[in-house]
Amino acid sequence: MKKLVCSKCRKVYESTKNGRCPSCGASTPHVYEFKNSDDYLKNEIPRILEEREKFGLNGLVGGMECVIINTEPSKQQDTVNELLRYTGHEFIEAFQDEVYLTCILKNGESTDLLVRSRVRNENPFREFNEFPKSKHLPNTRLETFVFQTRDIEKYVKIQKNRGVKFLTESILHATHYSFIQTVPSRFTGNSLGFIQWRGERGNYVTSESQSLGWKMNKPKSEYLKHIKELDHTATRVRAEDRDPAIIEFMELTNYNFNFAIYVRTFNSITNVARLSDGGFAMVFTSGISPYISDEESGPTEKFIHNYGPRVHHMAFRTENIEDTYSSLKEDGMDFIIELVGSPEEGLKQTFTGASEHTLLVNEYIYRYGDFKGFFTKSNVSLLTEATDKQ
Protein backbone atom coordinates (compact mmCIF):
# COMPACT_ATOMS: atom_id res chain seq x y z
CA MET A 1 0.00 0.00 0.00
CA LYS A 2 1.35 3.43 -0.92
CA LYS A 3 2.27 5.93 1.78
CA LEU A 4 1.35 9.63 1.79
CA VAL A 5 3.49 12.24 3.50
CA CYS A 6 2.59 15.74 4.68
CA SER A 7 5.42 18.26 4.27
CA LYS A 8 3.87 20.62 6.84
CA CYS A 9 3.51 18.35 9.88
CA ARG A 10 5.88 15.64 8.53
CA LYS A 11 3.49 12.79 9.28
CA VAL A 12 2.92 9.77 7.06
CA TYR A 13 -0.46 8.21 6.32
CA GLU A 14 -1.98 5.49 4.20
CA SER A 15 -4.98 7.66 3.27
CA THR A 16 -6.10 11.28 3.47
CA LYS A 17 -9.36 12.85 4.59
CA ASN A 18 -10.98 14.42 1.52
CA GLY A 19 -7.51 14.97 0.07
CA ARG A 20 -6.23 16.68 3.21
CA CYS A 21 -3.74 15.63 5.88
CA PRO A 22 -5.71 14.00 8.75
CA SER A 23 -3.44 15.71 11.27
CA CYS A 24 -2.99 19.33 10.20
CA GLY A 25 -5.48 19.68 7.35
CA ALA A 26 -2.92 20.61 4.71
CA SER A 27 -3.80 19.81 1.10
CA THR A 28 -1.91 19.31 -2.17
CA PRO A 29 0.94 20.16 -2.85
CA HIS A 30 1.81 19.61 0.82
CA VAL A 31 0.38 16.08 0.77
CA TYR A 32 2.15 13.86 -1.73
CA GLU A 33 3.06 10.21 -2.29
CA PHE A 34 5.99 9.16 -0.12
CA LYS A 35 9.31 8.55 -1.84
CA ASN A 36 12.72 9.05 -0.26
CA SER A 37 15.10 11.42 -2.03
CA ASP A 38 17.40 14.24 -0.95
CA ASP A 39 15.16 16.92 -2.48
CA TYR A 40 13.00 17.60 0.55
CA LEU A 41 15.99 17.66 2.92
CA LYS A 42 17.92 20.05 0.70
CA ASN A 43 14.90 22.34 0.50
CA GLU A 44 14.57 22.34 4.30
CA ILE A 45 18.22 23.13 5.07
CA PRO A 46 17.98 26.88 4.24
CA ARG A 47 14.95 27.17 6.54
CA ILE A 48 16.76 25.43 9.40
CA LEU A 49 19.86 27.60 9.00
CA GLU A 50 17.71 30.72 8.86
CA GLU A 51 15.86 29.73 12.04
CA ARG A 52 19.11 28.98 13.87
CA GLU A 53 20.21 32.54 13.07
CA LYS A 54 16.82 34.05 13.85
CA PHE A 55 16.42 32.39 17.25
CA GLY A 56 20.06 32.77 18.34
CA LEU A 57 20.92 29.07 18.21
CA ASN A 58 24.08 29.41 16.13
CA GLY A 59 27.09 28.37 18.17
CA LEU A 60 25.05 27.40 21.24
CA VAL A 61 25.60 23.65 20.80
CA GLY A 62 29.02 22.14 20.23
CA GLY A 63 30.42 18.64 19.97
CA MET A 64 29.35 15.51 21.78
CA GLU A 65 30.55 14.97 25.36
CA CYS A 66 29.19 11.50 26.15
CA VAL A 67 26.72 8.80 25.23
CA ILE A 68 24.50 7.12 27.80
CA ILE A 69 23.92 3.38 27.44
CA ASN A 70 21.26 1.98 29.74
CA THR A 71 21.29 -1.73 30.58
CA GLU A 72 19.38 -4.23 32.64
CA PRO A 73 20.78 -4.07 36.21
CA SER A 74 22.00 -7.68 35.98
CA LYS A 75 23.99 -6.88 32.82
CA GLN A 76 25.59 -3.58 33.78
CA GLN A 77 28.94 -4.94 34.96
CA ASP A 78 29.06 -7.41 32.06
CA THR A 79 28.52 -4.49 29.68
CA VAL A 80 31.36 -2.51 31.24
CA ASN A 81 33.71 -5.50 31.11
CA GLU A 82 32.81 -6.07 27.45
CA LEU A 83 33.58 -2.44 26.58
CA LEU A 84 36.86 -2.63 28.47
CA ARG A 85 37.76 -5.78 26.56
CA TYR A 86 36.89 -4.60 23.06
CA THR A 87 37.37 -0.79 23.01
CA GLY A 88 40.09 1.63 24.06
CA HIS A 89 38.00 3.10 26.87
CA GLU A 90 39.04 2.63 30.48
CA PHE A 91 36.97 2.35 33.65
CA ILE A 92 37.15 5.51 35.80
CA GLU A 93 34.55 5.15 38.55
CA ALA A 94 31.08 3.89 39.49
CA PHE A 95 28.54 5.65 41.68
CA GLN A 96 24.86 5.63 42.61
CA ASP A 97 22.30 8.37 43.10
CA GLU A 98 18.52 8.34 43.53
CA VAL A 99 17.88 7.39 39.90
CA TYR A 100 20.89 5.54 38.45
CA LEU A 101 23.88 3.32 38.99
CA THR A 102 26.46 4.90 36.67
CA CYS A 103 29.83 3.68 35.38
CA ILE A 104 32.14 6.16 33.65
CA LEU A 105 34.49 5.04 30.85
CA LYS A 106 36.97 7.36 29.14
CA ASN A 107 39.55 7.19 26.36
CA GLY A 108 41.65 10.33 25.94
CA GLU A 109 39.81 12.96 23.93
CA SER A 110 37.08 10.54 22.86
CA THR A 111 33.43 10.87 23.76
CA ASP A 112 32.85 9.43 27.23
CA LEU A 113 30.72 6.31 27.67
CA LEU A 114 28.26 6.31 30.60
CA VAL A 115 26.87 2.84 31.29
CA ARG A 116 23.81 3.00 33.52
CA SER A 117 21.01 1.00 35.05
CA ARG A 118 17.94 2.45 36.71
CA VAL A 119 17.31 2.21 40.44
CA ARG A 120 13.56 2.58 39.95
CA ASN A 121 11.31 0.95 37.38
CA GLU A 122 10.33 4.19 35.62
CA ASN A 123 11.68 4.22 32.08
CA PRO A 124 10.52 6.73 29.42
CA PHE A 125 12.34 4.73 26.72
CA ARG A 126 10.67 1.41 27.43
CA GLU A 127 8.07 1.62 24.65
CA PHE A 128 10.90 1.88 22.11
CA ASN A 129 12.35 -1.42 23.31
CA GLU A 130 9.20 -3.52 22.99
CA PHE A 131 9.95 -5.19 19.65
CA PRO A 132 10.23 -8.89 18.71
CA LYS A 133 14.02 -9.17 19.14
CA SER A 134 14.55 -6.49 21.80
CA LYS A 135 11.67 -6.96 24.24
CA HIS A 136 13.67 -9.47 26.31
CA LEU A 137 15.86 -6.47 27.27
CA PRO A 138 13.14 -3.88 27.99
CA ASN A 139 15.49 -1.35 29.59
CA THR A 140 18.44 -1.72 27.24
CA ARG A 141 19.51 0.71 24.55
CA LEU A 142 21.92 3.50 23.77
CA GLU A 143 19.48 6.14 24.98
CA THR A 144 21.07 9.57 24.99
CA PHE A 145 23.63 11.63 23.10
CA VAL A 146 24.93 14.49 25.26
CA PHE A 147 26.26 17.64 23.60
CA GLN A 148 28.15 20.55 25.11
CA THR A 149 26.43 23.95 25.26
CA ARG A 150 27.93 27.28 26.31
CA ASP A 151 24.64 28.69 27.68
CA ILE A 152 22.14 26.06 28.75
CA GLU A 153 19.58 28.51 30.15
CA LYS A 154 19.41 30.39 26.85
CA TYR A 155 19.27 27.16 24.86
CA VAL A 156 16.41 25.68 26.90
CA LYS A 157 14.39 28.90 26.80
CA ILE A 158 14.67 29.10 23.01
CA GLN A 159 13.77 25.47 22.43
CA LYS A 160 10.86 25.47 24.87
CA ASN A 161 9.44 28.47 23.02
CA ARG A 162 9.71 26.40 19.84
CA GLY A 163 7.74 23.56 21.44
CA VAL A 164 10.59 21.19 22.32
CA LYS A 165 9.77 18.96 25.30
CA PHE A 166 12.29 17.90 27.92
CA LEU A 167 12.23 15.00 30.38
CA THR A 168 12.40 17.41 33.32
CA GLU A 169 10.70 20.75 33.72
CA SER A 170 13.85 22.43 34.96
CA ILE A 171 17.58 22.18 34.35
CA LEU A 172 19.55 19.92 36.71
CA HIS A 173 22.32 21.93 38.38
CA ALA A 174 25.05 19.66 39.78
CA THR A 175 28.44 20.34 41.31
CA HIS A 176 30.36 20.44 38.05
CA TYR A 177 27.69 20.89 35.39
CA SER A 178 24.15 21.83 34.42
CA PHE A 179 22.18 19.32 32.35
CA ILE A 180 18.86 18.65 30.63
CA GLN A 181 17.65 16.17 28.01
CA THR A 182 14.79 15.93 25.56
CA VAL A 183 12.03 13.37 25.68
CA PRO A 184 12.75 10.37 23.43
CA SER A 185 12.22 11.18 19.76
CA ARG A 186 9.24 9.46 18.17
CA PHE A 187 11.37 9.02 15.05
CA THR A 188 14.55 7.52 16.56
CA GLY A 189 13.75 6.57 20.16
CA ASN A 190 16.87 8.60 21.09
CA SER A 191 17.12 11.52 23.48
CA LEU A 192 19.51 14.44 23.13
CA GLY A 193 21.14 15.82 26.27
CA PHE A 194 22.80 19.19 26.74
CA ILE A 195 25.50 19.90 29.30
CA GLN A 196 27.24 23.08 30.39
CA TRP A 197 30.35 22.49 32.44
CA ARG A 198 30.65 24.77 35.47
CA GLY A 199 33.44 22.95 37.30
CA GLU A 200 35.77 20.11 36.36
CA ARG A 201 34.98 19.08 32.80
CA GLY A 202 34.18 15.38 32.52
CA ASN A 203 33.31 14.98 36.21
CA TYR A 204 29.78 13.53 36.36
CA VAL A 205 29.67 13.02 40.14
CA THR A 206 26.99 15.01 41.98
CA SER A 207 26.55 15.89 45.65
CA GLU A 208 24.12 12.95 45.89
CA SER A 209 26.51 10.42 44.36
CA GLN A 210 27.75 7.56 46.49
CA SER A 211 30.71 5.50 45.32
CA LEU A 212 29.91 1.87 44.54
CA GLY A 213 33.49 0.82 45.19
CA TRP A 214 33.61 -1.25 42.01
CA LYS A 215 37.06 -2.18 40.70
CA MET A 216 36.86 -3.13 37.03
CA ASN A 217 40.21 -3.80 35.44
CA LYS A 218 41.01 -3.33 31.79
CA PRO A 219 42.72 -6.26 30.05
CA LYS A 220 46.37 -5.62 29.22
CA SER A 221 45.94 -6.66 25.58
CA GLU A 222 48.43 -4.71 23.45
CA TYR A 223 46.00 -4.22 20.57
CA LEU A 224 43.57 -2.16 22.66
CA LYS A 225 45.84 0.90 22.38
CA HIS A 226 45.03 0.97 18.66
CA ILE A 227 41.27 1.45 19.27
CA LYS A 228 40.78 5.19 19.49
CA GLU A 229 37.88 7.63 19.74
CA LEU A 230 34.20 7.13 18.95
CA ASP A 231 34.04 8.12 15.28
CA HIS A 232 30.29 7.92 14.68
CA THR A 233 27.15 6.05 15.63
CA ALA A 234 24.39 4.90 13.29
CA THR A 235 20.71 5.01 14.19
CA ARG A 236 18.24 2.91 12.21
CA VAL A 237 15.01 4.78 11.43
CA ARG A 238 11.97 3.83 9.36
CA ALA A 239 11.95 4.93 5.73
CA GLU A 240 9.09 7.35 6.35
CA ASP A 241 10.91 8.87 9.36
CA ARG A 242 14.22 9.50 7.60
CA ASP A 243 13.62 13.17 6.75
CA PRO A 244 11.94 14.20 10.02
CA ALA A 245 14.62 12.41 12.09
CA ILE A 246 17.44 14.31 10.39
CA ILE A 247 15.55 17.61 10.46
CA GLU A 248 14.76 17.17 14.16
CA PHE A 249 18.43 16.52 14.91
CA MET A 250 19.51 19.57 12.95
CA GLU A 251 16.96 21.77 14.72
CA LEU A 252 18.25 20.64 18.14
CA THR A 253 21.99 20.89 17.39
CA ASN A 254 24.36 22.83 15.12
CA TYR A 255 24.96 19.73 12.98
CA ASN A 256 24.22 19.79 9.24
CA PHE A 257 23.12 17.14 6.77
CA ASN A 258 26.30 16.27 4.86
CA PHE A 259 25.49 13.57 2.30
CA ALA A 260 23.56 10.34 1.69
CA ILE A 261 24.56 7.04 0.09
CA TYR A 262 21.74 5.06 -1.54
CA VAL A 263 22.09 1.27 -1.69
CA ARG A 264 19.07 0.42 -3.81
CA THR A 265 19.91 -3.29 -3.95
CA PHE A 266 19.21 -3.51 -0.22
CA ASN A 267 16.56 -0.74 0.01
CA SER A 268 18.79 1.36 2.25
CA ILE A 269 20.04 4.94 2.65
CA THR A 270 22.99 5.92 4.86
CA ASN A 271 22.81 9.61 5.82
CA VAL A 272 25.62 11.54 7.51
CA ALA A 273 25.29 14.71 9.62
CA ARG A 274 28.39 16.53 10.85
CA LEU A 275 29.57 19.70 12.53
CA SER A 276 31.43 22.05 10.24
CA ASP A 277 34.70 21.30 12.03
CA GLY A 278 34.37 17.53 11.73
CA GLY A 279 34.67 15.39 14.83
CA PHE A 280 31.96 12.93 15.82
CA ALA A 281 29.40 12.25 13.07
CA MET A 282 25.77 11.26 13.49
CA VAL A 283 24.61 8.68 10.97
CA PHE A 284 20.99 7.81 10.19
CA THR A 285 20.20 4.71 8.14
CA SER A 286 16.73 4.07 6.75
CA GLY A 287 14.96 2.19 4.03
CA ILE A 288 14.30 3.86 0.70
CA SER A 289 10.76 2.52 0.84
CA PRO A 290 8.76 1.43 3.92
CA TYR A 291 8.73 -2.06 5.40
CA ILE A 292 6.63 -4.71 3.66
CA SER A 293 8.19 -7.97 4.87
CA ASP A 294 11.55 -9.31 6.01
CA GLU A 295 12.09 -10.93 2.63
CA GLU A 296 11.18 -7.93 0.47
CA SER A 297 12.30 -4.93 2.48
CA GLY A 298 16.04 -5.46 2.93
CA PRO A 299 18.32 -5.61 6.00
CA THR A 300 17.73 -2.05 7.29
CA GLU A 301 13.93 -2.13 7.41
CA LYS A 302 14.08 -5.74 8.63
CA PHE A 303 16.27 -4.66 11.55
CA ILE A 304 13.85 -1.87 12.49
CA HIS A 305 10.89 -4.20 12.28
CA ASN A 306 12.60 -6.65 14.65
CA TYR A 307 14.42 -4.27 17.02
CA GLY A 308 12.64 -0.95 16.60
CA PRO A 309 14.27 2.36 15.69
CA ARG A 310 17.49 2.49 17.68
CA VAL A 311 21.25 2.91 17.50
CA HIS A 312 22.61 -0.03 15.54
CA HIS A 313 26.34 0.43 16.07
CA MET A 314 29.13 2.46 17.60
CA ALA A 315 32.15 3.00 15.32
CA PHE A 316 35.64 3.40 16.75
CA ARG A 317 38.56 4.80 14.79
CA THR A 318 41.17 2.06 14.74
CA GLU A 319 44.88 2.13 13.89
CA ASN A 320 46.72 -0.99 12.66
CA ILE A 321 43.30 -2.28 11.74
CA GLU A 322 44.41 -5.58 10.17
CA ASP A 323 46.36 -6.69 13.27
CA THR A 324 43.69 -5.29 15.59
CA TYR A 325 40.97 -7.20 13.74
CA SER A 326 42.96 -10.45 13.99
CA SER A 327 43.63 -9.88 17.69
CA LEU A 328 39.96 -9.16 18.40
CA LYS A 329 39.00 -12.45 16.73
CA GLU A 330 41.60 -14.32 18.77
CA ASP A 331 40.18 -12.69 21.89
CA GLY A 332 36.72 -14.09 21.19
CA MET A 333 35.02 -11.27 19.32
CA ASP A 334 32.51 -12.47 16.72
CA PHE A 335 32.23 -10.61 13.41
CA ILE A 336 29.40 -10.62 10.88
CA ILE A 337 31.71 -9.54 8.07
CA GLU A 338 35.43 -9.66 7.31
CA LEU A 339 37.43 -6.45 6.90
CA VAL A 340 36.16 -4.62 3.80
CA GLY A 341 37.90 -1.88 1.85
CA SER A 342 41.48 -1.26 0.77
CA PRO A 343 44.16 1.44 0.65
CA GLU A 344 43.08 2.18 -2.93
CA GLU A 345 39.48 2.78 -1.78
CA GLY A 346 40.68 4.89 1.15
CA LEU A 347 39.37 3.03 4.18
CA LYS A 348 38.76 -0.32 5.88
CA GLN A 349 35.85 -1.27 8.13
CA THR A 350 34.21 -4.23 9.81
CA PHE A 351 31.15 -5.02 11.95
CA THR A 352 31.06 -7.27 15.00
CA GLY A 353 28.11 -9.36 16.02
CA ALA A 354 25.61 -7.65 18.31
CA SER A 355 26.36 -7.64 22.02
CA GLU A 356 24.08 -9.89 24.07
CA HIS A 357 24.25 -7.27 26.82
CA THR A 358 23.44 -4.09 24.84
CA LEU A 359 22.29 -5.27 21.36
CA LEU A 360 24.93 -2.86 19.97
CA VAL A 361 27.34 -3.73 17.17
CA ASN A 362 30.90 -2.38 17.23
CA GLU A 363 32.38 -1.03 14.04
CA TYR A 364 36.14 -0.62 13.69
CA ILE A 365 37.16 1.86 10.98
CA TYR A 366 40.44 3.12 9.56
CA ARG A 367 40.76 5.89 6.95
CA TYR A 368 44.02 6.11 5.04
CA GLY A 369 45.86 9.42 5.21
CA ASP A 370 44.98 10.80 1.79
CA PHE A 371 41.31 9.74 1.94
CA LYS A 372 39.15 12.87 1.87
CA GLY A 373 35.76 11.26 2.26
CA PHE A 374 33.86 9.68 5.12
CA PHE A 375 32.44 6.43 3.62
CA THR A 376 32.54 4.69 0.25
CA LYS A 377 29.49 3.26 -1.46
CA SER A 378 31.10 -0.17 -1.90
CA ASN A 379 31.84 -0.50 1.83
CA VAL A 380 28.41 0.77 2.82
CA SER A 381 26.80 -1.81 0.51
CA LEU A 382 28.79 -4.70 1.98
CA LEU A 383 28.18 -3.63 5.58
CA THR A 384 24.47 -3.15 4.91
CA GLU A 385 24.24 -6.65 3.46
CA ALA A 386 26.04 -8.08 6.51
CA THR A 387 23.40 -6.72 8.91
CA ASP A 388 20.92 -9.16 7.37
CA LYS A 389 22.56 -11.78 9.62
CA GLN A 390 21.01 -10.11 12.66
Image (cartoon, grey):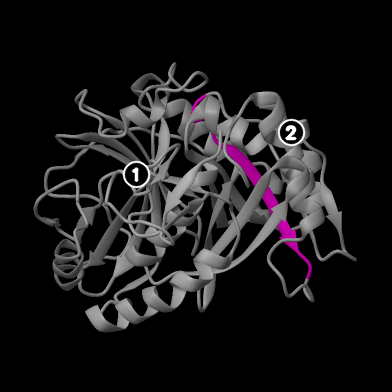
| Foreground pick, 348 / 287 | 287
> Which circle, 1 or 2, is nearer the viewer?
1
Task: Judge whether 376 appears above or below 143 on screen.
Answer: below
Q: Quadrant of the N terminus?
A: top right
**Who's the residue at 54% across and 44% down the image?**
239
Res. 58 in view: no
Q: Mark 2 points at which residue?
A: 335
242 or 252, which is in the foreground?
A: 242
Q: In 3D space, how far apart are the residues under numbered discs 1 and 2 (Cα atoms)? A: 51 Å
Compared to residue 13, the image places residue 308 above or below, namely above
- What is the span of residues highlighted in magenta in the rendered image? 357-368
Q: Residue drawn at (46%, 34%), measured in percent from left and top? A: 80
**How many callouts does the rendering have?**
2
Query: Alpha-carbon neighbours of circle 2 within 10 Å: few (<14), some, or many (≥20)?
Result: some
From the top left corner, tell me how far across and down residue 25 is, in percent.
28, 52
Towards the viewer: 371 or 295: 295
Note whether residue 55 is visible. Answer: yes
Of residue 187 and residue 368, the one placed in the foreground of this image is 187
Residue at position x 20%, y 74% from top? 151
Disc 1 marks a residue whose amino acid type is: Asn
- Mark 2 element type: loop
Determine the secondary structure under disc 1: loop
The picture places residue 195, in percent across and down from the top left corner, at 26, 62
**Residue position marked by numbered label 1 in the rendering:** 18
User: Which residue, as the protein is rendered here, is positioned at the far left?
Assistant: 170
Task: Name the image quarter holding the C terminus.
Answer: top right
Q: Where is residue 268 in the image (x, y as percent from the top left)?
A: 66, 46
Q: Position of residue 89 (x, y in %)?
A: 52, 49
In the image: residue 192, left or right of residue 63: left
